[in-house]
Amino acid sequence: MRLDAHAQARRLLERLDQAFLADLAEDPFTTIPVLFEDVTITKRPPSPQGRCDIDGSYHPGPPPRITLADDVPLSRQRFTALHELGHHLIWHDVELNELSVADADRPDEAICNEVAATVLLPTELVDEYLQPGAFTARDVATFFQGREIASRAACCVAAVRRLHHHGCVMLGSLEGTADFIAHQLGTPWRIARGTPQGEGSLLVAAARNGHARGITRVRFASGKVSGEVHGDAFDAGDGWIFMVVVADPYSPWEKGLRFATIEDRAPVDVVECPRCDHSFTASWAPCRECGDVKCPQCHKCGCVQRAPERMCGGCGLLKAENLFRAGGDTCVDCCT
């Protein structure tokens, strides 16, 4: 059985000094090193493409390090710092690490997202704004606009807990790409971050008209699409679209709008990484160069190098070029 990510996040946070939770929400960059004296937080330079696909990373060390991208908004950096704190808490949690569960049933990324969202948006606060089972994409956008310290991603994670059926809360671009997706517990399919939803998606329709709602389908990185689902998308007016997806025969928003059947399980393949022997289920597209699926454990496919890399003279690890200071032979983590 898949673990309840929200319940696990709350349990991990209960280990912390509760007097620091407000400080964690306001300024996790200085509060995390206070709570954990051995943890360092560094910012890395922008990627050569001008935008980082990964907002942050955690290295258990010793010493443990959290690295954040500095080319994303401050609210996103807060969310990412707390997400990486979640990885640190999981790394040192005896209960989680002694569980005999399959990798697919221990959703570390979802737990870390819940850690960040729970700190930034306490349950009592969310309950005041989002009605369980019936909230709309406009409600999520309004909720975000009133929370200055929280990121859009945190609002998606907090909102998806209130879905009564399988589905997700998505943050999409005006071009129709799913940038961040929070899935309801138990939802058997997953939409990978960065997956284009297509010209006919509700994301694109909302970008054109401000709001779009109806029976639709969502697209996965593999190119496959879901069965029919109910979707509600709203243009927040700041370059982003919030979208709520519910896989239930009856519409949460419009009386009488329903479909006969739903197909909410997307076929997935079990893959074994040839580099680290990690087994995982993959619903995302394979690498166009080598045909292998990128491993979520070592972040590599069958290509010799996914990006320009070189050996760090400090830690001895092979790292991407953009993680080195100009003219230096040690990475940004070793320079701090």
Image: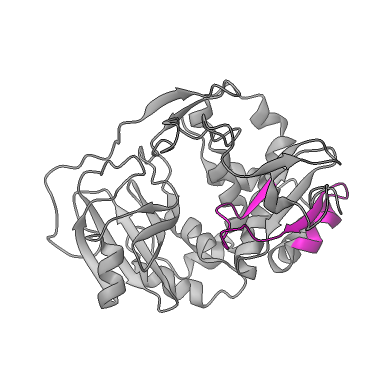
Identify the residue shown where x is 53% and y is 37%: 107
Magenta span of residues: 29-57
**Residue 13 visible to an observer of this rendering:** no
Q: Is-magenta flag for residue 15?
A: no
* Up/down of 89 relative to 22, above or below: above
- Residue 161: image x %, image y %? 45, 53
Identify the residue shown where x is 72% and y is 51%: 323
In this view of the protein, which residue sits in the foreground, 159 or 57? 57
Identify the residue shown where x is 40% and y is 75%: 236
Where on the picture, by quarter, is residue 132? bottom left
In this view of the protein, which residue sits in the foreground, 247 or 293? 293
Identify the residue shown where x is 36% and y is 44%: 221
> Number of numbered discs present?
0
Q: Quadrant of the C terminus?
A: bottom right
**Residue 44 visible to an observer of this rendering:** yes
Question: Does 288 sit left or right of 108 as displayed?
Answer: left
- Residue 74: image x %, image y %? 65, 69
Check the image and tell me how it is coloured: one colour
- Residue 178: image x %, image y %? 39, 56
In this view of the protein, which residue sits in the foreground, 50 or 257? 50
Q: Is-magenta flag for residue 38?
A: yes
Question: Does 16 sit left or right of 90 as displayed?
Answer: right
- Residue 335: image x %, image y %? 86, 52
